[in-house]
Amino acid sequence: MTGNKSRRAFIYQTGLATVGLFFFKKGSSKSWLVGSNNADRYKIAVADIMILKRQKIGEFELIKELGADGVEVDMGGLGNRESFDNKLADPIIRKQFLDKSKELNIQICSLAMTGFYSQSFAKRATYKKNIQDCLDTAKAMKVNIVFLPMGVNSDLEKQPELRSVIIERLKVAGEMAKEANVVIGIETTLNATQELKLLKEIGSPNIKSYFNFANALDAGRDLCSELMILGREYICQIHCTDTDGFWLQNDPKIDMRKVKNTLEKMQWRGWLVIERSRDAKDPRNVRYNFTANTAYMKKIFQKRDY
């Protein structure tokens, strides 16, 4: 009996590893990482822009020091430029980043177009070039998820009249992403039911939700219910922090063990990316805040005890 159980466990784990390898090689749009233990199922990353290392080679050493598994690399400033101030468009710099990533075993989990927090995705004339520049960089770096926020100037809660143009543009972006074999994760302030409706209207397997805890919490919505409504298939990656004030372990609005149980029920797997949740007493201290949040997230999501 024991032998049969061991054999079944071996076959199951081998099968999971094979599936995971297939997704990796094919750059699948599936969001979750398939593995036989918690550390494989959930990976913890930090956004480089939030640790003041936006597109700086030193971010890898710092991420290693913070204890994270990976980094979300920003595409650079946007402002009034035609496109991003993207140093990674230079193949020499890009190779330096890839080499350092490999050397320190710090994975680049996603590229972020945070310039769209302030720039209008709905109205910007060069949006196609901006998207293409990000997709080209992602493809060259073998990164299969990019982050696109619908920022203050494309906020569908406050500007619902932009809905049709945003859907039209995201359909275009979805076709571009499909060609590049990359998933674009969008962030909106919509509740989960409304965001799911939006994603279904867009109708692209390459446009998913990049879920942000802070949006739900700031609006007083139940975090776990929002995750369940969107579901596994529609969430490609998660920004797993709240607005600043408390470390994650001290945040009265988040029951992280409940969050993990919810993601387990959903059978979601993937990257949890730390942005904020800095202690209000010392918000500028990068090592103080991000070491604590990284350690806590790894304790909850990568230890078998939890």
Image (cartoon, rainbow, N blue to C red):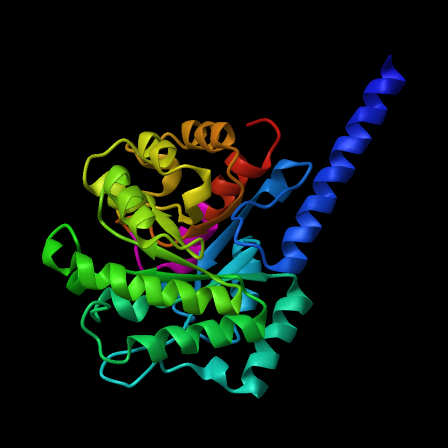
Q: Is 205 left or right of 69, judged from the image as shown?
A: left
Q: Is 245 left or right of 248, judged from the image as shown?
A: left
Q: Residue 64, how many percent across, how many down? A: 57, 60
Q: Residue at x 60, y 61 (%)?
A: 106
Main SS, magenta region, reads helix
Q: Residue 113, how many percent across, how many down? A: 36, 68
The extreme right residue here reads 3
Snapshot quadrant of residue 38: top right
Vertical order, 236 against 14 (above or below):
below
Seen from the viewer's position, the closer of residues 203 and 144 is 203
Vertical order, 221 against 182 (above or below):
above
Q: Quadrant of the C terminus?
A: top right
Vertical order, 35 against 161 (above or below):
above
The extreme top residue here reads 1
Bounds of the magenta segment: 282-293
Seen from the viewer's position, the closer of residues 274 and 244 is 274
Q: Residue at x 33, y 47 (%)?
A: 200
* Residue 73 visible in the displayed image: no
Snapshot quadrant of residue 83: bottom left
Q: Residue 221, how many percent across, how many down? A: 23, 34
Q: Residue 244, how many percent across, how many down? A: 27, 49
Q: Is 301 left or right of 186, judged from the image as shown?
A: right
Q: Is residue 230 magenta?
A: no
* Residue 214 visible in the displayed image: yes
Seen from the viewer's position, the closer of residues 103 and 199 is 199
Q: Could you tell me how many numbered marks the image carries? A: 0
Snapshot quadrant of residue 175: bottom left
Q: Residue at x 37, y 29 (%)?
A: 255
Q: Residue at x 39, y 62 (%)?
A: 174
